[in-house]
Amino acid sequence: MSSTSNSKLSFATRSVHAGYNSADHEGSLNPPIYMTSTFAFDNVAQGAARFAGEESGHFYSRVSNPTQQILETRLADLEEGEAALATASGMGAITSTLWTLLAPGDQLLVDKTLYGCTFSFMEHGLKKFGVDICYADFTDHADIQANLSENTRVLYFETPVNPNMRVMDIAAISALTKDYNPEIRVIVDNTYCTPALQRPLTLGADLVVHSATKYLGGHGDLIAGAVVGDAETIQQIRLSGLKDMTGAVIAPMTVFLILRGIKTLQLRMERHCQNAQAIAEMLEQHPTVDQVFFPGLKNNPGHQIASQQMDDFGGMIALELKGGYEAGVRMLNRLKLVKLAVSLGDAETLIQHPASMTHSVYTPEERAEHGISEGLVRISAGLEAVGDIIADLEQALEG
């Protein structure tokens, strides 16, 4: 089933069926796992044509694989893009994309708050090779406009932001960027929302990246990533950034697990969102909590924008305790059901301390500059009964 034939089907139905026809695979209900590194040609001319891109078909699994192709078709369909590329990790998707699109002397304009490894790659990777990394507050559109230049090639941001949950207006940012220069590529990390909640390409973005490790896989048993966009750019990333630069090739078994996870994506996201909303409302009223950062709360600065561009408010929450860092450590160490672990989007509720864990690559000064406080705690609401999650958080907060 192609994205065209799927266009009238619901998201949940496409999550199960898009990109796969069992009749083409001996009637197998689930896609076969092609565990092969290379593919045989009928003759020399066919091999040459495939290497030259003149004939469709697979020739080496570092470039493409039939199992991978099913996942990529499904992801492109769900994100409403032309094509997708699956990679070995979220960072594999980000690095393969940016190495393809940027050259020495180019400016990469990014929001001031990023996932720790994304920030580290930009600061310690791209910058080393002559790319100008420029930071702005993307909630302030005047700040974006003030930093756009003739050398700007890519504009990159997350929404909601990891870890402090700031919300960016994708449509407005994309429009003002394209008004300045339509050639600038707008890239959105959509890991927190997935296409079940937010589809940046429909709001004006050019490319979407994912850590498929998180909600797309959904069960904490794989590492993977993806990038979605127009077919020409995705092919460039496949043949340049992935094939020749990062080699971040996804394994067929991992692809199979993501396909299995995506079948229940909408169901899981509904439960993640319900649980997160209830947890955030409890935390907002708790006497030991200073601030809760969750776009589903009506007093959150990003609530109105999130209401417009997201189908629900997601499963991620951040909070600050009145007792600061020390109170946060006590809380984290007293939890029994909620797991102290990095990552997110799993069936289990996870909690972590960004300053010492996922965002520890920032120096203390950089964290202060980029809006990541030392006492911030991040929660990924799982699929457990919400009463059990709340009871565990309450007993930990009262300790």
Image (tube, grey):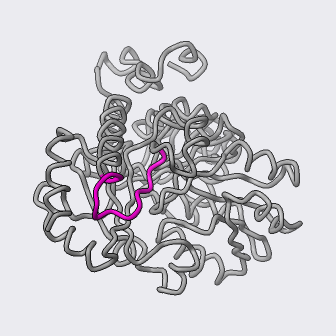
Q: Residue at x 69, y 47 (%)?
A: 233
Please, is residue 36 above or below residue 378 in the view?
A: above
Measured as percent of width and height from the top left, residue 302 is found at 57, 49
Q: Which residues are magenta?
A: 283-295
Measured as percent of width and height from the top left, residue 49 is found at 65, 41
Q: Residue at x 46, y 35 (%)?
A: 312
Q: Is residue 329 magenta?
A: no
Q: Is residue 105 left or right of residue 121?
A: right
Is residue 312 in view?
yes
Q: Is residue 165 left or right of residue 47?
A: left
In front of the other: 305 or 270: 305
Is residue 36 in view?
no
The number of callouts visible is 0
Q: Is residue 287 magenta?
A: yes
Measured as percent of width and height from the top left, residue 282 is found at 29, 48
Q: Is residue 173 left or right of residue 339?
A: right
Q: Residue at x 31, y 16 (%)?
A: 27
> Which of the image's four quarters has the C terminus?
bottom left
In front of the other: 94 or 157: 157
Please, is residue 107 above or below residue 299 in the view?
A: below
Please, is residue 229 above or below residue 114 in the view?
A: above
Measured as percent of width and height from the top left, residue 377 is found at 34, 66
Query: Where is residue 81, by image quadrant?
Result: top right
Query: Where is residue 255, by image quadrant?
Result: top left
In front of the other: 337 or 87: 337
Q: Residue at x 55, y 60 (%)?
A: 94
Please, is residue 303 above or below residue 184 in the view?
A: above
